[in-house]
Amino acid sequence: MTTLLDIHNSENHRLTSWQKEMLQCFHSKLSDQKSKFPCIPATAGHALAQLRYGFADNPATEDAAKQLAGLLASYGKSSREFGSYTSLIVFFDTTKLQELHLDVPDYFQVFWELLSKAAAYDTSNWPAHIPEDPKEMLWEYCFGEEKYFMYCATPSHQAKKSRNFPCMMLAITPRWVLEEFQSKPKPAAAIKKKIRQRIRAYDSNEIHPDLNDYGNRDNLEWKQYFLHDDNTSPARCPFHRRKQD
C-alpha cells in the first residue's frame, strides 16, 4: 500500500483492523499528556495534522522495500505542502518477525537491509553535496534527491520506551524541516533541552551517547537512526546503496 494517508481523511474507513490499530497506538503515544512523548516537533506535527502515514509488508521482504520506495517518492513530491512539522510515518507488518522473537540487534539488520533495498528503487541521482559513505559526518539517507532523517522503533525495544512500538515503525523527516527548526537558534536550543528532559523521564536508561546534531564533527548521522536498547553503538553501518539492474 503506497498511498499516503492523512489520519483525518475519509479514506480511513478502508483500512484493515491492524492498520487502524497501529494508527490508534500511534495517536495514543503522541497525545499522552501524562507520559509525554519526548520529540516535541513530532507531537506538534501530529496535533497539527501535518504528518502523513503509510503501511508496508514484512520489512524483511523485497515487497516492503518497494512499498517504502513508493511512499518516499510520493511523499517527497508533496511534503512541502503539508507544513513545517511534517514527517512520513510508515508502519510495517512485523507479525512473522515477532513470531521469530527477534531482538533489537536483529531488527537493526532488518532496518538497514530495508533501507539498502529501498535505495535501489530510487531513479534519481544521489545529491552531489552529500557523501555516499555513512562514515562521513555529512552523510544522510537520500531518496528522490531529498535528504531525510530516519527514526526506527521496534517491538523489541524495552528500556528505550521512546523507541518502542507494537510493530516496526519508521518516522522519516525531511532535512528541510530540521533546517527550518534550526533557523531560530534560541527557541531550537530551548526545545532540544526540553526534549532531553523528556527522554530522561520517558526511558528507563540514560540518553544514548550517539544522539547528536547533524554536521557536528563528532556526529555520525546513521547511528541516530536506530538506537540500541542497551546504549551500545555499532562499529559500522550496514547500509549499501544498491542499484537495480
Image: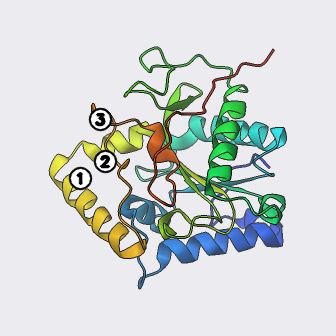
Figure check: 124 above or below 153:
above
Q: Position of residue 162 (x, y in %)?
A: 48, 66
First reached walking from the N terminus: tag 1 or tag 3: 1
Q: Position of residue 198 (x, y in %)?
A: 33, 70
Q: In the picture provided, is 114 more to the left or to the right than 221?
A: right
Of helix, strand and loop, which one carries label 1?
A: helix
Out of 75 and 204, give the one closest to the viewer. 204
**Residue 73 picture quarter:** top right
Out of 104 and 123, give the one closest to the viewer. 104
Which residue in the structure is indicated by mark 1? 188
> What label sits on residue 218 in the rendered view?
3
Q: Position of residue 239 (x, y in %)?
A: 60, 31
Rounded to the nearest angstrom, the CA distance separating label 2 from label 1 is: 6 Å
Rounded to the nearest angstrom, the CA distance separating label 1 from label 3 is: 20 Å
Tell me which amino acid carries mark 3.
Answer: Asp
**Residue 216 picture quarter:** top left
Tell me which amino acid carries mark 1.
Answer: Ala
Are circles 2 and 1 on residues that touch, CB within 8 Å?
Answer: yes
Which residue in the structure is indicated by mark 2? 181
